[in-house]
Amino acid sequence: MITIYSEKHRLRDAKTELFGGLLVPPYESPSRADIVLARVNSKKLGEVIAPREFGLEPVLALHDAGFVEFLRVAWDEWSQTEYEGEVIPTCWPARRMSQRIPDFIDGKVGYYALSSETSISKGTWEAAIASKDVALTGAELLLNGDQTGTSLLAPLKASGVKGVFSLCRPPGHHAAFDMFGGYCFLNNAAIAAQWFRDNGIERVAILDVDFHHGNGTQDIFYEREEVLYLSLHGDPRDAFPHFSGYSDETGQAAGEGTTFNCPLPRGTQFKTWCDKLKECLTKIDQFGAEVLVVSLGVDTFEKDPISFFKLKSDDFLSIGKLIADLKRPTLFVMEGGYDIKELGINVVNVLQAFEG
């Protein structure tokens, strides 16, 4: 399996995260990609290639233009103030308040933020742009094939299921149409899914196996009928992002029925989780998805520092095999899973099992 990776992820190296009432070193750190890449190489998963640049057109196909411009200039505007730290929102347009966008960066960041744990630091924009290019390069490879010109979307043989791994950092599934947060700035998986749509794919499914609900992906496609979004995640009554991911959120307008949420309680073991995964995979098959995008978070692991599921490393082998059984061309897009030694093991277990 080919892995897409960019060294530019290191430009996103924030020093502060608001967690438990304290400013702590961020859980979403450059070492995450290092751990995964080391495992990809040590297990000889396949070639590692750099992304090509796609520009902003695929981003603006589904993110608000004002939001994108805010991300581009936020650090520069913050640097021109008297503030000495990183960009952290301190107020929001809460219920019954004006929804007008302030001029001053301290207010502007609150307008575009969905949460306060994620600071914007120098290099964040550049890293986010590179991350979406990592996702798009994986999508392009899946659609148009390798250097031989062989499309991975050609009719599939029983043993010919194909996948590509986009090692995205920063992650993306919390980034909504016009909001950042949850360590996410641009929604890599959603951008890739839209790119597939814009390049002739009729039906795309996004399977989100990250511990946290992908509120951003849901927000972007909630009224769309041609993109199916399915998520298994911690019950939002107890888990971030708290205000998204309930089972009665099923889409609206043309998108009614194309959102499927599976919130699960504290201490969920693999059998319960896996039963829900099988339910999701059946829905993907029934939907007739031509391409599958997997938001690959492995923070469902029992030792992950900011989750409460109980999956073990061997369980990720089962996940990869079950996804492969769908026999759909699959783009894996890296999401969560935090700085522990098993991170690379769990990610590569999914990918190796998918390849069979």
Image (cartoon, rainbow, N blue to C red):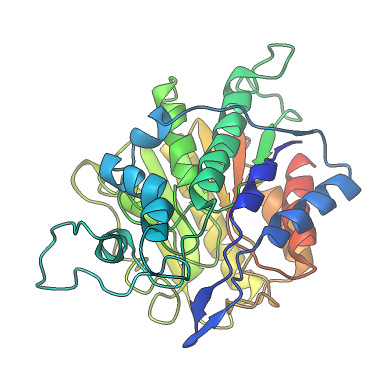
- The residue at the point 38 percent across, 47 percent down is 73
**Does 2 appear above or below 38?**
above
- Number of marks drawn: 0
Q: Quadrant of residue 149?
A: top right
Percent x, y for residue 3? Answer: 73, 38
- The residue at the point 59 percent across, 83 percent down is 267
Placement of the N terminus among the 4 image quadrants = top right
**Does 131 appear above or below 77?**
above
**Does 211 appear above or below 130?**
below
**Apparent side of residue 254 relative to residue 120 in the rendered image (left or right):** left
Q: Nearer the viewer, residue 155 or 28?
A: 28
- The residue at the point 25 percent across, 48 percent down is 256
Percent x, y for residue 328? Answer: 59, 34
Percent x, y for residue 352? Answer: 79, 46
Q: Is residue 217 visible?
A: no
Q: Nearer the viewer, residue 83 or 323?
A: 83
**Apparent side of residue 307 relative to residue 235 in the rendered image (left or right):** right
**Apparent side of residue 255 relative to residue 329 in the rendered image (left or right):** left
- The residue at the point 66 percent across, 77 percent down is 310
Q: Nearer the viewer, residue 200 or 182?
A: 182
